[in-house]
């Protein structure tokens, strides 16, 4: 199946720093979702985006639906140790079947 | 609380045996569910789309006779790994779309907690 390009692949940051990651697709999507996955667990939804240009926040997390509808961005402000995990983007053109990004592994150094 | 329940969370089996994994939507009906496979430190790869009352749709390269999917009710889909071999060892995750109401209904994919399959 299709897989989205997500970058960076991994990040090592100091606690308190801001984080940015992005996801690109060769296809136009009408829905972008951002998930976080802890080891041995299923992904947990962070933010859902449904409209080009949409900017949505969830606490310290902010995500944007790119204007081209082929990309999306996730920012985490003032990172804390519990932000550690793997972050995945997911996009869909049908709103039903989603394809996932390659993941960004985040390590926060206290 | 959990919106999608997946069972078992972990299974260890001998090579050649079959393993069944269940995925249930807890407070909503799901005519469609999805099955993913995830290798260590890699992303989720869609294996198949489970359709209630009809045959599953498999992604290219996924053996339908190897990974049997049954979507017998609006709240339950099962994935059976038949004649499992060590190379089938992986993390299997299901998801189900839940539609939020309103004029502009929106689908959000909710995931089960995953099943760690280890084939000896």
Image (spheres, grey):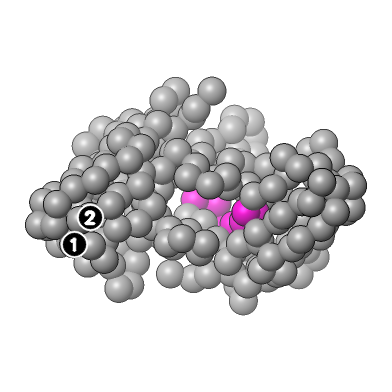
Along the viewing direction, whichever of A74 and A25 lies nearer the viewer: A74
Mark drawn on residue A61: none
Badge 2 marks a residue whose secondary structure is strand
Q: Residue furthest bottom?
A: A26
| Quadrant of the image occupied by residue B5 | top left
- Which residue is found at the position 35% from the left and 47% from the top? B116
Residue labelled with disc 2:
B119
What segment carries the magenta color?
A86-96
* Residues under numbered marks 1 and 2 in contact, where contact means CB atoms less than 8 Å apart: yes
Q: Is residue B10 above or below residue B15?
A: above
Give the position of the N terminus of chain A as an image quadrant: bottom left
Badge 1 marks a residue whose secondary structure is loop
| Quadrant of the image occupied by residue A106 | bottom right
Q: Position of residue A37 (x, y in %)?
A: 58, 47
Q: Mark 2, chain letter?
A: B
Q: Position of residue A66 (x, y in %)?
A: 78, 63
Q: Position of residue A44 (x, y in %)?
A: 58, 41
N-term mark: 1 or 2: 1
| Quadrant of the image occupied by residue B88 | bottom left
Dominant secondary structure, magenta: strand
Q: Position of residue B69 (x, y in %)?
A: 23, 50
Residue labelled with disc 1:
B85
Q: Is residue A51 visible?
A: no
Is B15 positioned to the left or the right of B34 in the image? left
């Amino acid at each position: 199946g299709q897989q989205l390009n997500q970058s960076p692949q991994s990040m090592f940051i100091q606690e308190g720093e801001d984080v940015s990651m992005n996801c690109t697709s060769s296809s136009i999507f009408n829905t972008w979702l951002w998930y976080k996955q802890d080891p041995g667990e299923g992904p947990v939804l962070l933010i859902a985006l449904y409209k080009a240009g949409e900017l949505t926040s969830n606490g310290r997390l902010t995500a944007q639906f790119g204007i081209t509808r082929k990309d999306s961005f996730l920012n985490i402000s003032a990172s804390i140790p519990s932000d550690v995990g793997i972050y995945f983007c997911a996009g869909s053109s049908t709103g039903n079947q989603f394809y996932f990004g390659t993941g960004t592994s985040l390590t926060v150094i206290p | 609380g959990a919106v999608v329940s997946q069972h078992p969370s972990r299974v260890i089996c001998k090579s050649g045996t079959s393993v069944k994994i269940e995925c249930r939507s807890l407070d909503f009906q799901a005519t469609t569910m999805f099955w993913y496979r995830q290798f260590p430190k890699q992303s989720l790869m869609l294996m198949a789309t489970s359709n209630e009352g009809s045959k599953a749709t498999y992604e290219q390269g996924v053996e339908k006779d190897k990974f049997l999917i049954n979507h017998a009710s609006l709240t339950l889909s099962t994935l059976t790994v038949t004649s499992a071999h060590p190379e089938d060892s992986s993390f299997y995750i299901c998801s189900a779309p839940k539609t939020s109401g309103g004029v502009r209904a929106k689908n959000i994919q909710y995931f089960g907690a995953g099943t760690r399959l280890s084939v000896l």
